[in-house]
Amino acid sequence: MSQPEPVLVVEDLKVEFPVHGGLLGGRRIGTVKAVDGVSFEVNPGETLGVVGESGCGKTTMGLAILRMIDITSGRIVFDGEDISTLERAAMRPVRRKMQMVYQDPFGALDPRMRAKDIIGEPLVAHGISENREAYRERVSELLEMVGLDVVMGERYPHEFSGGQRQRIGIARALALRPTLVVCDEPVSALDVSIQAQIINLLEALQDELGLTYLFIAHDLSVVQHISDRVMVMYLGKVVEIANRSDLYRAPKHPYTQALLSAVPMPSPDAEAAREVVLLEGEVPSPLNPPTGCPFHPRCSMARPDCRETMPVLTEQNTGHKVACHLY
């Protein structure tokens, strides 16, 4: 059988923001390279986890893929169509097929709207429902789909718990029957027990609806549970990408090794026996990134060529790519 075409293909994506200074802030003094040459693809029904420290460009990349912010260069191909340069009007029908679940389940909801109106807003904006009865049926279906009672649609956001609010956000994202859902740290603001419920819900919805996820997170335990493949980012670049089992079993990049060594283990004996890789220093400023490999100032295995040349993301094993001069 032939391999299905990827739902999403990203090629050499760059997102840069100008920094202005001077007396009146009118002089350009630099450029922040938030996303710097990222390339990857996501296959139908797959979950690609994206991990990295705060400020590595994960959320900016997600917003750029949805064309919610402008890209500087590169290509974004969604469902076989290059959407990199589409104008606002041309993007409108594409937006039905790509949606986002936000990190803050309260800030992402309008406090003046009832839950049923929040969920149904995309239907109204895109003129999907044929009549009011069809609209009500679809909203009720979405509420039940995410585990909420239909009568709860009459409530306002402040009357829900954090987990329930995130369920509303998920229902809104599914209203237009999308193909791709970008999940931007959807459980980071929730209690651990509620995190598990939301992750299980996302997995059940993926199986039922055939969804494809780009799952952005900083918690590697959560990413390990839900992802098929994992992509590690550092300072706007991809440093490693592999199948979940390969990455967690045998991480290759020193940064990935350090991240995984910080994940708590359930067994006290295993926790005491393992070697923890400590990261020294802070993440460099994207306004003034280091030369060569962006990780070399914090890497205990850095060599002279790490300081001089940028490593290329190359395939080491089947599907396992790493950007490191050690390989």
Image (tube, grey):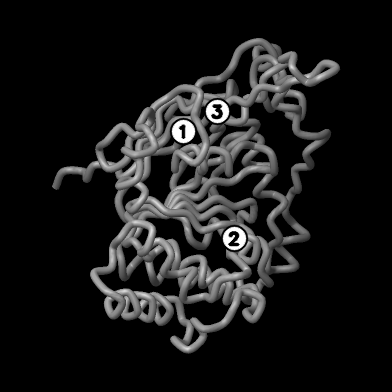
Q: Nearer the viewer, mark 3 or mark 1?
A: 3
Q: Is residue 16 above or below residue 137?
A: above
Q: Is residue 245 above or below residue 64?
A: below
Distance of mark 2 from mark 3, alpha carbons? 23 Å
Q: What residue occupies the far left of the structure in this picture?
A: 1
Q: Nearer the viewer, mark 1 or mark 2?
A: 2
Question: Circle 2: is it few (<14), some (14-19), or many (20+) Cα within 10 Å?
Answer: some
Q: Which SS class for mark 3?
A: strand
In this rendering, position of residue 41 left or right of residue 13: left
- Identified by mark 1, the residue type is Lys
- Identified by mark 2, the residue type is Ala
| Residue at left offset 57%, top offset 72% | 196
Check if mark 3's residue and mark 1's residue have beta carbons within 8 Å.
no
Question: Residue 321 bears which disc, if any?
Answer: 1
- Of 271 and 69, nearer the camera is 69
In this rendering, position of residue 169 left or right of residue 130: right
Question: Residue 108 bears which disc, if any?
Answer: 2
Q: Residue 132 at what x, y percent from top left?
A: 31, 76
Distance of mark 3 from mark 1, alpha carbons? 22 Å
The residue at which mark 3 appears reads as 15
Check if mark 2's residue and mark 3's residue have beta carbons within 8 Å.
no
- Which is nearer the N-term, disc 2 or disc 3? 3
In this rendering, position of residue 279 left or right of residue 105: right
| Residue at left offset 48%, top offset 61% | 226
- Which is nearer the N-term, disc 1 or disc 2? 2
Q: Which SS class for mark 2?
A: loop
Q: Nearer the viewer, mark 2 or mark 3?
A: 2
- The quadrant in which residue 133 appears is bottom left
In this rendering, position of residue 157 left or right of residue 118: right
